[in-house]
Image: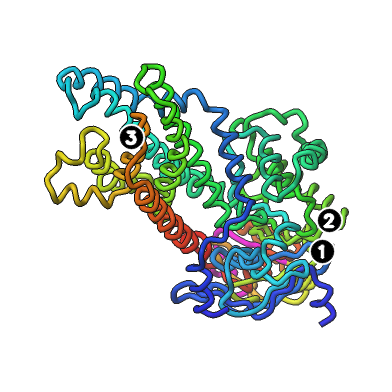
């Protein structure tokens, strides 16, 4: 086989098949064994931020952009929590399975393709992210922060958010030499997004150039879909936000697949 | 040509280059149904790359591979459905029990849940882990893990098994159990491709084998044929005070061929009687007289220097 066909094989579009399901089920089975500590860990931090800042800082901001601050931050936290859950799963957990435990090697000895494994990992990260976002929604409902059944539509947005950030996380995992490498991704991408994209305060408070930057970051579009629904309003420019998230997801999945092929199949 | 046509696995003109090194530099071999075929060679000889090529996980730069009638890598997935693999490094799922490891792995083959469950008792018995079905992997011994890995490779009832150094790191008891199981599988008609560093293992199990070095096949045949072809039937290993002088004179006259490695002299002879009689008269020299083995062939052909 020539170099050319080698390259064609590496850069071919992902060819997913239903065989990704056993990979997803494997990860579900592991999670079920550790579900409670895992839930507590995933939910604890966002809840502390949400309740602490929401009620603490919120008491100083009685008239915050027309809504209680706790509502503002809770709706933002739904997004950042979903993002973080997908990110942690595709960075640390996927890296463990690929690099440390060699679980992927075992799977690739069966009639599975690398594309199946990547999609299975992404499907699982999406599932876990969905659970994290849903947990914040449930707590918000219990606190009486959600007033409209329209908020149920958020359940349709969460998988999109999880899938997008899962795909982006896999790109990082595909090129990562070790766990330490992930810190760059958090410092350069995830943390700035959490601050700039309207989770804690409106994007409009930023200087103009940062507002422009925020408009191209995926978390901004997630927040702009979720927050109105949380308040019981239909979001503006739904198609734009969905397309931006889908574009990040597609580009991430393609890049991750190509980079994993380079790493594992040569 | 007949041998190739009936072969379970046939590789022709296989080449694979990484950077400037040709790791597999043009090899041909064919494995017949029901045989245990050995792939031997020092570290870096190209064994593991050859296995990955045959599994369709890596595309060759040149050459053709047919496994179980399927062209690989084009239809590697179809071929892998009928192959079982025991990898060099244990990659059992540490979060799962023995039983869960088998079930989860069976799903990767697209097997139905009830079909896998029906196979479980047989697989657990084969691995000698009937009492451990619900045990977590971390608490198993090295030998148990290897047996489970072997059972896991059988979950799809494969026709062909790839075993990459299956007994590395095991104690002699555990190793003998694995050998016994592999013989059982051969008796059932399975075909085995075995890579190993243990010449004793290859001698016991393999009907035919190739020795690879630097990406090439340097010899092939049955263990007996290789020993008869390449080395004298007797080996006398000698060490002790005065070895230098003895090596310079009597040894040279009495042995067909001598090799020095560290402070030991390996003397290869057709008839050891004269050499042994001479050594008996020299109490300062200690010796071991033994029949030639595959290891002697291996060391003669691949050299004694370290390969890291």
Residue in the foreground of this view, choosing between B255 and A148: A148
- Which dot marks residue B35? 1
Q: Which residues are magenta?
A: B235-250
Residues behind callouts 1 and 2 on a single chain: yes
Task: Check disc 1: other Cα within 10 Å, few if <14, some if 14-19, many if 20+.
Answer: many
Residue B248 is covered by the magenta coloring: yes
Residue in the foreground of this view, choosing between B150 and A255: A255
Q: Look at the numbered disc 3 and give the secondary structure of its residue.
A: helix
The chain under label 1 reads: B
Where, by quadrant of the figure, is residue B211 drawn?
bottom right
Identify the residue at image location x=52%, y=61%. A14
Give residue B252's position: percent from left, percent from top.
63, 76
Give residue A175's position: percent from left, percent from top.
39, 56
Residue A9 is left or right of residue B37, and the answer is left
Residue in the foreground of this view, choosing between B65 and A261: A261
- Contact? badges 1 and 2 (CB < 8 Å): yes
Q: Look at the numbered disc 1 and give the secondary structure of its residue.
A: loop
Residues behind callouts 3 and 1 on a single chain: no
Which residue was labeled with disc 2?
Answer: B186
Q: Is A220 rendered above or below residue B78?
A: above
Q: Is A152 rendered above or below residue B56?
A: above
Q: Is A138 rendered above or below residue A168?
A: above
The chain under label 2 reads: B
Which residue was labeled with disc 3?
Answer: A228
Residue in the foreground of this view, choosing between A126 and B170: A126
The chain under label 3 reads: A
Sequence order check, earlier mark of 1 and 2: 1
Identify the residue at image location x=51%, y=75%. B17
Residue A13 is covered by the magenta coloring: no
Give residue B149's position: percent from left, percent from top.
68, 45
Identify the residue at image location x=51%, y=73%. A8
């Amino acid at each position: 086989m020539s170099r050319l066909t080698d390259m064609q094989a590496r850069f071919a579009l992902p060819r997913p098949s239903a065989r990704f399901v056993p990979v997803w089920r494997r990860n579900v089975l592991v999670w079920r064994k550790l579900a409670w500590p895992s839930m507590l860990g995933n939910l604890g931090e966002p809840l502390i931020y949400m309740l602490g800042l929401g009620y603490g800082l919120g008491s100083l901001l009685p008239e915050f952009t027309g809504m209680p601050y706790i509502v503002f931050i809770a709706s933002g936290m739904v997004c950042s929590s979903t993002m973080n859950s997908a990110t942690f799963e595709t960075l640390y957990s996927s890296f463990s399975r690929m690099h440390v435990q060699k679980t992927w090697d075992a799977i690739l000895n069966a009639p599975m393709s690398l594309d199946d494994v990547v999609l299975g990992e992404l499907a699982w990260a999406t599932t876990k992210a969905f659970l994290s976002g849903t947990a914040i929604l449930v707590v918000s409902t219990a606190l009486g922060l959600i007033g409209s059944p329209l908020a149920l539509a958020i359940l349709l947005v969460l998988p999109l958010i999880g899938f997008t950030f899962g795909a982006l996380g896999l790109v990082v995992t595909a090129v990562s030499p070790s766990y330490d490498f992930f810190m760059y991704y958090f410092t350069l991408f995830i943390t700035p997004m959490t601050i700039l994209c309207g989770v804690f305060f409106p994007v409009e408070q930023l200087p103009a150039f940062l507002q422009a930057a925020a408009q191209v970051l995926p978390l901004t579009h997630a927040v702009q879909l979720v927050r109105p629904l949380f308040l019981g309003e239909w979001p503006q420019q739904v198609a734009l936000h969905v397309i931006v998230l889908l574009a990040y997801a597609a580009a991430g999945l393609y890049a991750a697949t190509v980079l994993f092929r380079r790493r594992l199949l040569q | 040509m007949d041998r190739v046509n009936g072969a379970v696995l046939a590789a022709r003109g296989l080449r694979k280059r990484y950077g400037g090194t040709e790791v597999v530099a043009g090899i041909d071999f064919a494995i017949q149904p029901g045989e245990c075929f050995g792939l031997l060679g020092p570290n870096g000889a190209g064994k593991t790359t050859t296995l990955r090529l045959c599994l369709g996980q890596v595309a060759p730069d040149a050459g053709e591979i047919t496994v179980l009638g399927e062209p690989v890598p084009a239809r590697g997935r179809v071929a892998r459905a009928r192959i079982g693999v025991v990898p060099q490094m244990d990659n059992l799922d540490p979060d799962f029990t023995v039983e869960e490891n088998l079930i989860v792995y069976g799903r990767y083959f697209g097997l139905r849940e009830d079909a896998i469950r029906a196979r479980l008792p047989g697989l657990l018995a084969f691995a000698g882990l009937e009492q451990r079905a619900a045990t977590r992997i971390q608490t198993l011994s090295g030998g148990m893990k290897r047996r489970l890995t072997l059972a896991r490779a059988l979950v799809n009832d494969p026709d062909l098994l790839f075993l990459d150094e299956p007994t590395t790191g095991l104690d002699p008891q555990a190793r003998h159990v694995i050998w016994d199981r592999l013989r059982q599988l051969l008796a059932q008609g399975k075909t085995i491709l075995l890579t190993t560093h243990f010449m004793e293992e290859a001698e016991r199990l393999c009907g035919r084998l190739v020795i690879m070095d630097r990406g090439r096949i340097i010899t092939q045949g049955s263990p007996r044929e290789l020993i008869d072809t390449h080395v004298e039937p007797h080996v006398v290993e000698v060490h002790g005070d005065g070895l230098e002088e003895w090596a310079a004179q009597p040894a040279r006259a009495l042995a067909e061929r001598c090799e020095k490695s560290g402070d030991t002299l390996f003397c290869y002879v057709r008839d050891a009687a004269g050499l042994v009689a001479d050594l008996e008269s020299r109490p300062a020299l200690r010796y071991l007289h033994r029949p030639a083995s595959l290891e002697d062939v291996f060391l003669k052909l691949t050299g004694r220097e370290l390969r890291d």
